Amino acid sequence: MAGSAGRRVVVVLGCVLAVVLLVGSGVLGHRISVLIDDVAQLAGGIAATIVCGRTATRRTGSERQWRVLMAAGMACWSAGMAVWAFYRSVLDMPLPTASVADLGFFLFPVFAVPALFAFVGVSPRRAAAGARHVWLMSLLDGAVVVGSLFVLSWATVLGAVVHSSESEPIEFLVAVMYPITDLVLVAMIVLLIVIPTIAARYRSQLTLLGAGILMLAISDSIYAYLVAIGAEFMPVLTDGGFIAGTALIALAAATPRTVDDGPSGYSPSTYRPSTYRPSTYGQEPAPFAYTNSIAGERTQMLLPYALMGAIGIVLAVLRVLTGALDSTVVVLGVGVVLLSVVRQVITLIQNDNLLRSLTLARDELTYRAHHDGLTGLLNRSSFDEHLRAAVNDARAGRKSVVLLLIDLDNFKSVNDRFGHGGGDELLVELARRLDGCVAEGVAARFGGDEFTALVHADLDSGRATAVRIAEAMRAPHEIDGHPVSVGACVGVVQIGRTHEANPDNTASRTTGVDQDELMRLADRAMYRAKREGKAGVYAYDAVGTLSRVPIDMDQDNLGTRPKMVAGEPDPARLMGPPTRT
């Protein structure tokens, strides 16, 4: 390390060394040295808790997650240390026996294990499960890992050592748990450091964190040895690992921010699948990082079950060789199994919730892929599928279907006066009316102010539906308190009876069924209605003649200049009052 971070490490470790040498020199007397030793350890634990917690608030992703977990672990450790200091410095117990202090110390690795897993990162799949699920599963994983390792240690070596120890079994059991859990954490850190992508991003943090946990492990091992030989005193100099370890953990948390977590550092609070873009500041390509994240997740997911399998194998071998099992192994093994069952139940529930969410998301995407986002009608691509199916049915002679093409009149005037918000409101209302008119068939928004419909009926019924649509469209609708009416032109073609006629309608011939041809004829009929005065319906009959379908008496026999009808917008109403700004 270089720069201010390196100088900070040198200064802090120099202060720790000075304190250790002071209390170990005996200059201040044994009682004062023990007091200073306990205060230094407690101060180190509290400092590590505060630094981890405060720096976590300014970080994101994996860097935040491991600091939060380590803050919780160090808080438990500090609580245990406070009880320990009370025993030694207040009650003057040279080597405290098993007490409630050990509960706080034992909770430290339960939080530290998931904290180390956080360096691997949370994949998008786990991030989607939610922050509460990730934290709970991490803590359960930590408890299962620590419990499994202890069961394996007890079943193979630790049990025999405890039974042959000169100290009380429970005291030695408690004492020997410390170095075992610490060494497990050190081993995990070593494994993380050898992963290139993790080492490149978190080298400084992992180095300091590993060094801190190693210092704790050294002092814990000395403590376990002293308990094993029945010693009554623990030299204050041997507590130097506790002081240095907590200081190094605080320094690890205070390490300057690294490049923001990329794909291998997803977190439930920051991951957004639609907006995330991999950082380019020297990180590995996204696919490689994503694979690394998934691999780390699988390791974390499978590790507890692998340890449980190892427990089962070891216990089975011991049962065969010895004919009996230690009651401690049985009790702790059952506890680990229960924790694993809880973990599995939570996983199953979460997987079920995720499956339901994915199903809903899939249904929503399917709906959006086939429907217009504004009106809720079918979109153009979906309508094309329905039209293709109708053409195939017509070719097979299965059913009669009529194609309608609808275009609104003077809709631009509505947008000009009321803005696109008012225009969208009117489109939604007109789409609702259109959908209500097409009882037997489907309606779609073709684009802009154009709509289409397929009516499962004969030509006469299709014409009647077109008339109902034209009349429904011209009914007034209020926008910002002003009634607005627009007309609609409708072109009608019966699928299976398509005809190609010239614009003057002087000749026609029957043709085969074709989607493009049908749309061209419907479009021609609709634009004929626009040329003839708007708000009208034109249809091809069975012999290929294009003619108007009467809507009301006012529309019959219109001259070259049609008069105003109810389906058309009232110019006076559309032009006044002035558009709001």
Image: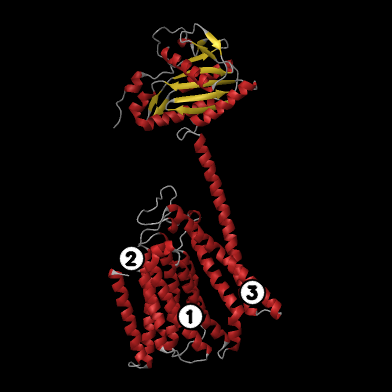
Q: Alpha-carbon distance for marks 2 and 3?
A: 44 Å
For disc 3, the neighbor class at 10 Å (few under 14, some 14 to 19, many from 20) is some
- Circle nearer the viewer, 3 or 1: 3
Query: What x and y, as percent, mark residue 474?
Result: 45, 21
Q: Is residue 405 left or right of residue 164?
A: left
> What number is the disc on residue 101?
1
Q: Where residue 551 sits in the image (x, y, percent)? A: 49, 14
Name the amino acid type tagged 2.
Pro
Residue 256: assigned label: 2
Of the 4 image quadrants, the one containing the N terminus is: bottom left
Q: Earlier in the sequence, mark 1 or mark 2?
A: 1
Q: Residue at x 56, y 46 (%)?
A: 359
**Which residue is at a point 33% across and 26% down the rendered structure image?**
416
Vertical comparison of 509 with 480: above or below: above
* Quadrant position of the C terminus in the picture: top left
Q: Does 50 appear above or below 486?
A: below
